[in-house]
């Protein structure tokens, strides 16, 4: 697994953790420990996304601070 795939997996894990904590907090809204863990997971995911985008470009087409056409920059997947 290369660095790009590793970052993608870490981002997916952070997103899953956030979703799981959201679901837990739906049924346990007063759990301050879980709310703190959610905030920590969100900061972790933001840092991972920032790191990914600095190295490999935008993760999706809705990134506001990126060029609309950044996804077409080289290299294309089949060029690697």
Image (spheres, helix red, strand yellow):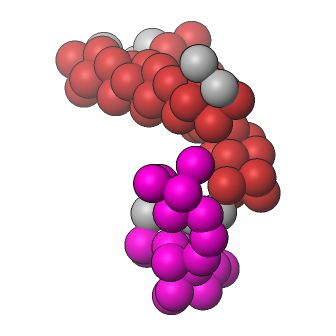
Q: Where is residue 21 drawn, in percent x and y?
A: 39, 20
Q: Residue at x 58, y 49 (%)?
A: 80
The region drawn magenta spans 61-80
In the image, 50: left or right of 71?
A: right
* Most common secondary structure along the magenta stretch: loop
Q: Is residue 74 magenta?
A: yes
Q: Is the residue 15 above or below the residue 31 in the image? A: below
Residue 51 screen position, x and y as percent: 76, 46
Give 54 or 18, whichever is nearer the viewer.
Answer: 54
Percent coordinates x, y for residue 66 in the rendering: 63, 79
Q: Is residue 10 magenta?
A: no
For this orientation, the residue located farthest to the front is 79
Can you name the residue that lies furthest to the bottom here? 68
Whether residue 64 is visible, yes or no, is no
Which of the two residues, 67 or 20, is positioned nearer the viewer here? 67
Q: Is residue 69 above or below residue 52?
A: below
Q: How many marks?
A: 0
Between residue 1 and residue 35, name the one nearer to us: 1
Residue drawn at 45 percent across, 29 percent down = 12
| Residue 60 image point, x, y percent | 44, 63
Query: In front here: 52 or 79?
Result: 79
């Amino acid at each position: 697994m290369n660095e790009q795939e590793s970052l993608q997996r870490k981002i997916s894990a952070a997103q899953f953790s956030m979703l799981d904590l959201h679901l837990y907090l739906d049924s346990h809204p007063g759990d301050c420990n879980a709310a703190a863990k959610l905030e920590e997971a969100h900061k972790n995911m933001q840092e991972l996304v920032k790191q990914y985008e600095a190295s490999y470009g935008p993760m999706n087409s809705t990134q506001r601070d990126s060029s609309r056409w950044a996804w077409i920059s080289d290299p294309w997947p089949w060029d690697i």
